[in-house]
Amino acid sequence: MPRKPRVPSYRLHKASGQAVVTIHGRARHLGRPGSDKSKAEYARCFAELTTGAPVQPTGNRCTVLCAQTPA
């Protein structure tokens, strides 16, 4: 039986004090938690995940924290 796709959670990264989301094993900082910019960046990252096509950034950068997967 196939697994249901999970919605990535918008959560607090305690060490940096920023909102973060993990997509495909990579943590992405979104900005100050609860801010409009961080929520817009989360929506952009989620739209990119669901459509498979890159979406234009909202001005708040989406930084990859985890190591890159080997090519």
Image (cartoon, rainbow, N blue to C red):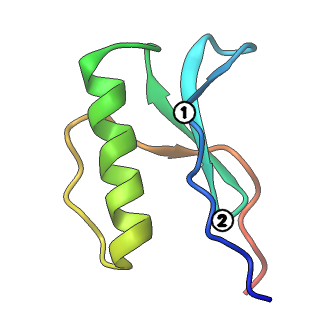
> Three-letter amino acid code at disc 2?
His
Residue at 58% across, 41% down: 21
Position in image of residue 40 (x %, y %): 27, 35
Position in image of residue 46 (x %, y %): 40, 55
Q: Tell me the SS state at disc 1.
A: loop
Q: Which of the two discs, 1 and 2, labels the residue nearer the N terminus? A: 1
> Three-letter amino acid code at disc 1?
Tyr
- Check disc 1 and report the residue beneath it: 10
Point out the frontmost of discs 1 and 2.
1
Position in image of residue 41 (x %, y %): 33, 39
Tell whether 32 sits left or right of 56. right
- Check disc 2 and report the residue beneath it: 24
Quarter of the figure with residue 60: top left
Position in image of residue 29 (x %, y %): 53, 33
Residue at 73% across, 13% down: 14
Q: In the picture shown, does residue 18 fall above or below 55? A: above
Q: CA distance from mark 1 to mark 2?
A: 14 Å
Q: In the picture shown, does residue 17 fall above or below 27? A: above
Decide which of 8, 64 is in the foreground and name it: 8
Residue at 20% across, 41% down: 58
